[in-house]
Image (spheres, coloured by chain):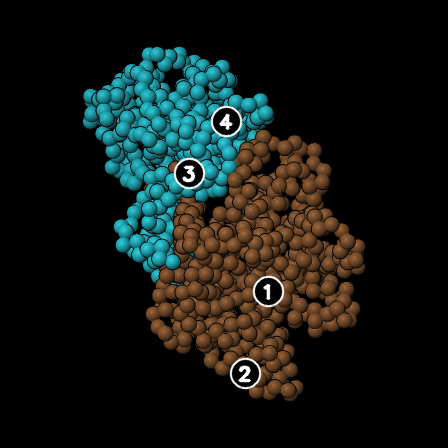
Amino acid sequence: MVFSSLTFLFLFLPLTLLFHYVTNSNIVRNLSLSLFSLIFYAWGEPIWVFLLLFSSFFDYGNGLLIEKFKGTVKAKLILILSIIGNLGILIAFKYGGFIWENINYIIPLSFPKPTNTLPIGISFYTFQTVSYTIDVYRGEVKAQKNVINFLMFVSLFHQLVAGPIVRYQTIETEMENRRFDWEDISSGVSRFCFGLFKKVIIANIAGELVNKYLETGFNDLSSVEAWFGIMMFSVQIYFDFSGYSDMAIGLGRMFGFHYDENFKHPYAAISVADFYRRWHISLGKFFRDYVYIPMGGNRKHQLLNIMVVWLLTGLWHGASWNFVLWGFYFGCFMIIEKLLENILNKTPKIIRHLYTLFLIILSRSIFYFVDFSQLKLFIIKLFSSKSYVKESFYSDLYEHLYWFILVILLCIPFDELLSEKHPVRMSVNRVLKFSQPVLNLVLLLICIVFLVDSTYNPFIYFRF
Amino acid sequence: MLSLFAGGFSFFILPKKTISVSEKRTLASLPKLHWNSYVNGKWSDSIDQYVNDQSPFRFELVKLASSINYYRGIHLANREKVMVVAKPQKPNNVNTVTSDSISRKTNAVEVFEEAYSGNMLIINGSVFTLNRGNPKMAAMFGKMLSKYALELNGKTRVISCIPPLSCAYIPSAKYNDYKLKNRETLLSIKQSLTNGALFCDVQDELNKHTDEKLFFSTDHHWTARGAYYAYVAFCNGVGLEPVSLDKMERRVKYDFLGSLYQLTRDKSVENNPDSMEYFIPRVQTNAIHYGPSDYTKPLKGSLFCHGCSGGNSYSTFLCGDIPLVKIKTNIKNGKKVLVIKNSMGNAFTVYLVNHYEEVYAVDFRYAQHNLLTLIKQNAINDMVFALGLHGAMAYGTIQRMHDLGFNNELVRKKDAALKDTTLQNNPSPTFTSSSK
């Protein structure tokens, strides 16, 4: 099940809210949320829901044992067991085929390539439970004694399949102390509607253009069209991912949870480092807190630490060499920026912003094309294509003009450019305060119209 | 939030629909829960499909989406654009054994669903499927016809009467390449015909009339005029004198928004509906329909369905895609023709009543009778392949047409069920133009 589906909007969410708020008891609410979250997950993974359950009970037990044996070698061994267990599950399901391919390339293997499907959200929930056991070990959080509460933490449908990666300490208190709060529900609804709008109206339309320019062969693709296609992919990936994060945060608020922000206008960044302080923030923090700093951070062989983090980040995104290349690409630029920090700080912001956008958009092609020969062809097209721009390209520009303007406006960080006391910002806030319910309704209705439209499935010939 | 509760509530209380006429498919019903369907994910997919298909005010919301989409930007006149149309998804409802009871033994229908997806060019409210043809596969089609010609050994003439695709007539010199590639594909059929099989140069005849409307703007079929010029090419190929259009009764149906509009839902196409003229030969005819359900119970049919209208206007010809239509005329010359066709052939077949005492129209996608048996039992003089070029250059359809004659395992219905008792007992066929 996905948030941007009619089943979720009309059936699942209303029922979940009803069962959550029909009682004042947090125990019953947590039980209800856990059950609904498992139903949500089992909807797409009827078999691998048991893997999720196993992972939850595994680290529930590990957390209790680590706390019990705190300060002893046993605690460390249990932590190592938890890390190996979680990463082992992740490696087996996500990287098994990739590892087999690469070993088989050098030494032919006698057993067949693993072909299991990748369970949805495994990259997120394994990281989530690993962060929990490490935090318990470090004494930053107390182990959760209630198995239902822990199951809820791991399986909570808000962030289970697409993040953000929620740290246990973020919601530790709220697990047992949530109140009915109209302000939270109202903010949550607004945030959810906005996220849904970003996904359905911006990301999905960008996806149509990506499909048109990047999926129908490169034979007569001009450089302009190639850049346009990869820019649309940059739009799609941002609004899809940040839209989901907005919906997750909004859903959290509706149920009394307050998750951290996961995106902060990344396309306004003025350096690659700045970009990744604004993009998928929870993942960046995970690698910072659990890999970069333990390796020595900026105190010991910093450049090596940066490269290791980025190679792992690349691999986390997918089991394919293009993702490793993508990680290497950013590792290099992070290092270059570190080494040229003084020069870059003296460069005008606009130049830094443009150079950052260029690098980010170019990197999307490495992310998009899993096949290296296709990637090579596309990079060539980006910089030297003998094909002409087609008439239909101009039609696409005209026919999406208002949509492009909306995309640009949504990328601009008005809240950073205008201070809280700025008259324009204060006026907008005043208008929003009164019009928010109507705006939410309009956004929601537009999204529902488009979601229903996306189910339109005409055939050439009668099928009845 | 209230609107979500309202949406959920109205979903439960509003009555459920079974068919979507504009999409030409059945809508999903509530699936039953079985362990197997749960484990393989089909049950949850079916629930999603059910909720999608039964959303409150679905048709109205789809229309509203078209209007909102229009305001994504500016629409300039005389602009051309390319739209990518996705292949339709076969319903995944666990309640249905098959999604299409008519064509469950063939993927010939799927070939056409695939053909009418991908890149579509829209110029001035007209839609063209962009396809450069496939000479290699077309040669296989020609060889298949030659095999029939060899088997029939001169007793029945085998004739190819295949038109080019509409993209051969895009009104812009930039797309001339499509005309040339279509020509190459059709010549590939001609060059591969042997054993006396004949080639009728439909494209050559159509090229003489490019100032007339040969293909619909909003539908994937050709017009009655386009089909007429194919009939002229056929007559020239077999030595018949074509009957001119002014000797037939002309009728027109308006506001025809066809299949390509439904696929693209483009506003400029919506504002450019087709008028569908058709020409009724002044010949008395009596038509019998066999199938799609029971071949032993043939139904009284009609050469034209005058009542078909709106998005279904093209079904005027032969009343749609019936597996086998037998037409008896008052032309007493003992000549019989068998047309192997898809829906493109419907508009062509109706002209043949001017020359034959009996006309058999077999829709190869749905037919379940052995063609060679049909030909031999009924002493057919001419076997004409009159279908859209897509069908003549796709492996699945060529194999299907081949198997209808040469693969007895494919063909379930024995031709004893096709004895023409109804026609024999009805000595006074009615003139079809006066019906409906």
Q: Say if labels 1 and 4 share a chain.
A: no
The tag on residue B77 is: 4
The tag on residue B262 is: none
The cyan-coloured chain is labelled B
User: In the figure, A283 relative to B417: above or below?
Assistant: below
A232, A246: nearer the viewer: A246
Q: Amino acid at mark 3?
A: Ser
Q: Secondary structure at mark 3?
A: helix
Residue A210 place in picture, x, y as percent = 57, 44
- Asked if marks 3 and 1 touch (Cβ < 8 Å), the reply is no
The tag on residue A282 is: 1
Q: Chain of mark 1?
A: A
**Which of pointers 1 and 2 lies earlier in the amino acid sequence?**
2
Q: In percent of the image, x 44 and y 24: which residue is there?
A: B215
The tag on residue B67 is: 3
Residue B157 place in picture, x, y as percent = 43, 22
Circle 2 crowding by C-alpha within 10 Å: few under 14, some 14–19, many from 20:
some
Q: In percent of the image, x 25 and y 37: which residue is there?
A: B297
